[in-house]
């Protein structure tokens, strides 16, 4: 499903009203590369602040960086953070429909070495952003939530990992032995048909056995994509509740 921000939607207006005005928010494109592939993300920051509260990397859903990630980045910038919506597909990727989204995500799921290399390239690029800080947290939605867990398993040098309604399964041949001591938080719906409660239980057991700090917050009845404005799965209580949980996590870890 192709996502778009719908400012007139009641749910979007209600959520946006809960956050500070963004008059000082500056949003700029960011290009970086890995080998021959050029990536294009975007960074949002509050230009009126002398010091950022921390750097946040946002991993997109399966349809790439669009208005949704931009809005989330601006919301985080309004909280005082430097928010970088990263690109894992490449600037020239064709993203015009479900078949394209499946092709791009499927290629990364099938090639975990490339998946991890692209995550690391974005982490490296984040360190050079204006206003970037030494401490960074990565968060992501749907496909991005699965990417966050991939970053944690590869031992990315970050201060925390937050997955919103992401795929929770650990790929065959992987484990959590390389994960560092940074905490992992999972924000999920109990009715998610992509990764259900059994998958969550397995993940929590894996994290506990590996000694990785972890937590989860679950919204009863929430389905997949519960944060996506305008989608059939949108759930206002789960969206605002998970956003509040993210901000608490950032307060603790940045």
Image (cartoon, rainbow, N blue to C red):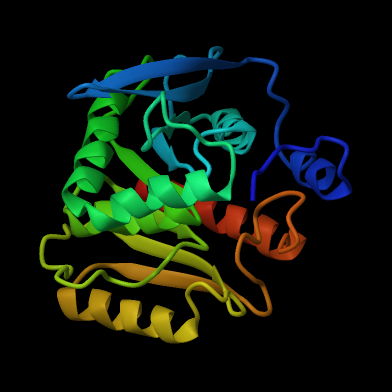
- Residue 55 sits in which quadrant? top left
The residue depicted at 44 percent of the width and 66 percent of the height is 186
Compared with 125, 248 (above or below) is below
The residue depicted at 64 percent of the width and 51 percent of the height is 1
**Nearest the camera: 252 or 58?**
58
**Nearest the camera: 82 or 112?**
112
The residue depicted at 56 percent of the width and 74 percent of the height is 218
Residue found at the very far front of the displayed protein: 99
| Whether residue 96 can be seen here | yes
Say whether residue 190 is left or right of residue 155: right
Say whether residue 174 is left or right of residue 122: left
| Whether residue 249 can be seen here | no
**Residue 82 placement (x, y as % from top left):** 45, 27
- Residue 6 sits in which quadrant? top right
**Residue 188 placement (x, y as % from top left):** 54, 69
Q: Quadrant of the C terminus?
A: top left
The residue depicted at 37 percent of the width and 45 percent of the height is 138
Residue found at the very far left of the displayed protein: 177
């Amino acid at each position: 499903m192709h996502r778009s921000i719908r400012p007139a939607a009641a749910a979007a207006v209600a959520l946006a009203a809960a956050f500070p005005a963004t008059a000082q928010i500056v949003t700029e494109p960011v290009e970086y590369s890995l080998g021959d592939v050029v990536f294009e993300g975007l960074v949002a920051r509050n230009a009126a602040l002398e010091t950022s509260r921390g750097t946040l990397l946002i991993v997109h859903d399966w349809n790439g960086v669009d208005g949704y990630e931009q809005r989330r980045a601006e919301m985080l910038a309004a909280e005082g953070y430097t928010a970088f919506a990263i690109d894992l597909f490449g600037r020239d990727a064709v993203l015009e429909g479900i078949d394209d989204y499946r092709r791009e995500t499927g290629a990364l799921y099938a090639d975990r070495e490339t998946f991890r290399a692209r995550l690391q390239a974005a982490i490296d690029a984040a360190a050079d952003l204006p206003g970037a800080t030494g401490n960074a947290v990565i968060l992501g939605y749907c496909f991005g939530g699965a990417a966050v867990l991939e970053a944690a398993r590869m031992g990315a040098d970050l201060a925390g990992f937050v997955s919103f309604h992401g795929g929770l399964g650990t790929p065959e041949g992987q484990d959590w032995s390389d994960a560092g001591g940074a905490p992992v938080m999972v924000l999920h719906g109990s009715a998610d048909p992509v990764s259900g409660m059994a998958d969550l239980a397995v993940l929590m057991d894996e994290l506990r056995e590996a000694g990785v700090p972890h937590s989860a917050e679950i919204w009863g009845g929430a389905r997949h994509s519960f944060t996506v404005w305008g989608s059939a799965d949108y759930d206002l209580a789960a969206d605002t509740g998970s956003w509040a949980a993210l901000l608490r996590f950032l307060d603790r870890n940045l």
